[in-house]
Image (cartoon, rainbow, N blue to C red):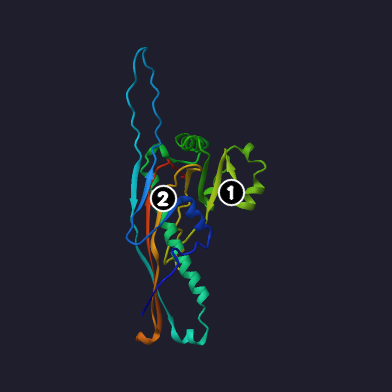
Amino acid sequence: KRLVHASSSLPMISDNGNAAAALADVRQVGYGDTARFIIRSNELYKVNEIAEGVNRGVLQPIHNDEITVNASPIEIAAEADWYQMAAGVFDLADWGLRVARSFEQFIFLKVLGALTSGVTKLGAAYNLTGFTQANWTALAQRIAAVNGNSEVFAIGTLSALGSVIPAQAGLQYGLGKEIVEKGYLDRYYGTRLIVLDQALKFNTINTTAEFAIPDDMIYFLPVYGDKPVKLVYEGDNVLVEREPTRTPDKTYRVRIQERVGVAAVIGSKIGALELQ
């Protein structure tokens, strides 16, 4: 049995790895450490009119908040036939890629789940239902205004963003080529659209092939603001190996372990539009 420390984090090898980075602040901490995030207040001071001769008005304290995120262990345990390895037919590169993709998808779905949970807690003002021009522009303006008039982008699956087209026939002219080529518009009423690659739920690939990301949700986020999800890696990857001479069925066994923490920490306000 052998224990090996690998790299500090597995590589992101698909577009959703980049999407996770766009949605989450990533922090690396040492073993036993807790990640600490300072959430700046988004409030402005109230300007008061005062009478002549008054020294000062009421003091207005504005406080930041502090959030901590702890990591917990996750693992992949796998085995390979010793005979295939000895014969040189076991594709180690493909196996390593499969491990990296598995970790990546698990963490990405955790990030997306935290995003959904976080925006739901913001209340009705930041969660609208029904795709209409009024709802779209209201939510985009609201997210921009609450974040210092930051530029806003909308993120969702190809199916969700493909539904974002003007209702008026006159505004649809000339958009067909872009939609057919890309599947969605680059911008809609001033808001940039960014596509999330769809993923399948675990253990459904060869059966029902269920989508893991909802196709009826679009999320609105500020370009200049705190990312809504915090992703924490603690320590290094740990690789635990067991050699074929020490296993009853002569298989080479390996366990890859990481310590990962994911939490929704909504400092900068975000929004969600349900298309139904």
Left or right: residue 274 compared with residue 176 = left
Q: Which type of secondary structure does the marked residue at label 2 adopt?
A: strand
Q: CA distance from mark 1 to mark 2?
A: 26 Å
State which quadrant residue 212 falls in.
bottom left
Residue occupying the point 45% across, 55% down: 213
State which quadrant residue 106 falls in.
bottom left
Residue occupying the point 56% across, 43% down: 192
Left or right: residue 128 compared with residue 72 = right
Q: Which type of secondary structure does the marked residue at label 1 adopt?
A: loop
Under mark 2, the amino acid is Val
Residue 98 at x, y = what percent?
A: 48, 70
State which quadrant residue 4 falls in.
bottom left
First in residue order: circle 1 vs circle 2:
1
Is residue 124 visible in the rendered image? The answer is yes
Q: Nearer the viewer, mark 1 or mark 2?
A: 2
Camera-side residue: 105 or 253?
Answer: 253
Under mark 1, the amino acid is Tyr
Q: Which mark is residue 229?
A: 2
Camera-side residue: 185 or 114?
Answer: 114
All told, the count of numbered labels is 2
Residue 149 at x, y = what percent?
A: 50, 35
Residue occupying the point 39% across, 18% down: 49
Residue 209 at x, y = what percent?
A: 46, 63
Q: Neighbour class for label 2 at 10 Å: few (<14), some, many (≥20)?
A: many
Whether residues under marks 1 and 2 lie with C-beta atoms below 8 angstroms apart, the answer is: no
Residue under label 1:
184
The N terminus is located in which quarter?
bottom left
Camera-side residue: 126 or 20?
Answer: 20
State the residue lying farthest toward the top: 52
